[in-house]
Amino acid sequence: MTRILGIDPGSRYTGYGVIDTERGRSRLVTCGRIVAGTGAMPDRLVTIDRELAGIVRDYVPEETAFEEVFVDRNVRSALVLGQARGVALCVAARIGLPIAEYAPAQVKMALTGSGRADKEQVQHMVKLLLKLQGRLVADAADALAVALTHAQVRGMRQRTGLALTGSWKKSG
């Protein structure tokens, strides 16, 4: 069994999802979102760091998965997101967790079969794959989607004997 922490960083809300995966089956351990608020950016970054470190300490993941940054036209938003993402990456790297990164289209393709799927389709598949009922916060759903993508890629590479390379990055 492998425990994977998926992270969807954001400057106001950071989604997280922890799954256990074994032999092609995944099970939800926990998910949610960290509310960093709207205060000064350094304070928000400290909140993200502290809360993510607590999740890592409490749930002891063996690997982490992130969605690669999508850069839109708004440079300021991209820079702010990059700061939050950097803090989240640092939490994983600080304790030597392997870090995998996936393009948004790769996550959509892995879960729905289409790299152009919308958020509702991805969220539906997350709920279906993890046998979840009820509403799922979007940030947590995105984090679970990247964790499930990593579980799928990881399983495929293990079954085929391929090394975990490419989008896979070992921290440290």
Image (spheres, rainbow, N blue to C red):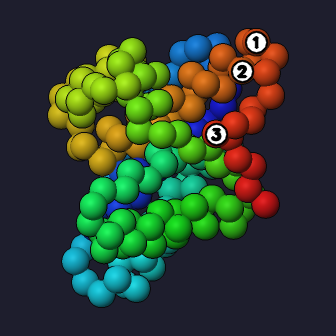
Q: Quadrant of residue 125?
A: top left
Which residue matches tag 2? 157
- Residue at 40% from the left image edge and 85% from the top image edge: 42
Q: Which amino acid lies under the numbered mark 2 shown in the image of this protein?
A: Arg
- Residue at 61% from the left image edge and 67% from the top image edge: 90
Left or right relative to 100: residue 171: right
- Residue at 35% from the left image edge and 41% from the top image edge: 142
- What SS does tag 1 mark? helix
Label drawn at residue 167: 3
- What SS does tag 3 mark? loop
Nearer to us of marks 1 and 3 is 3
Tell me the quadrant of the picture where the C terminus can be found: bottom right
Q: Which amino acid lies under the numbered mark 1 shown in the image of this protein?
A: Thr
Viewer-proximal residue, 130 or 89?
89
Q: Quadrant of residue 53?
A: bottom right
Viewer-proximal residue, 112 or 5?
112
Which residue matches tag 1? 160
- What SS does tag 2 mark? helix
Check whether the beta carbons of the residues at disc 1 and disc 3 lie within 8 A of each other: no
- Residue 129 location, x and y as percent? 39, 18
Q: Residues within 10 Å of mark 2 (few under 14, many from 20)?
A: some
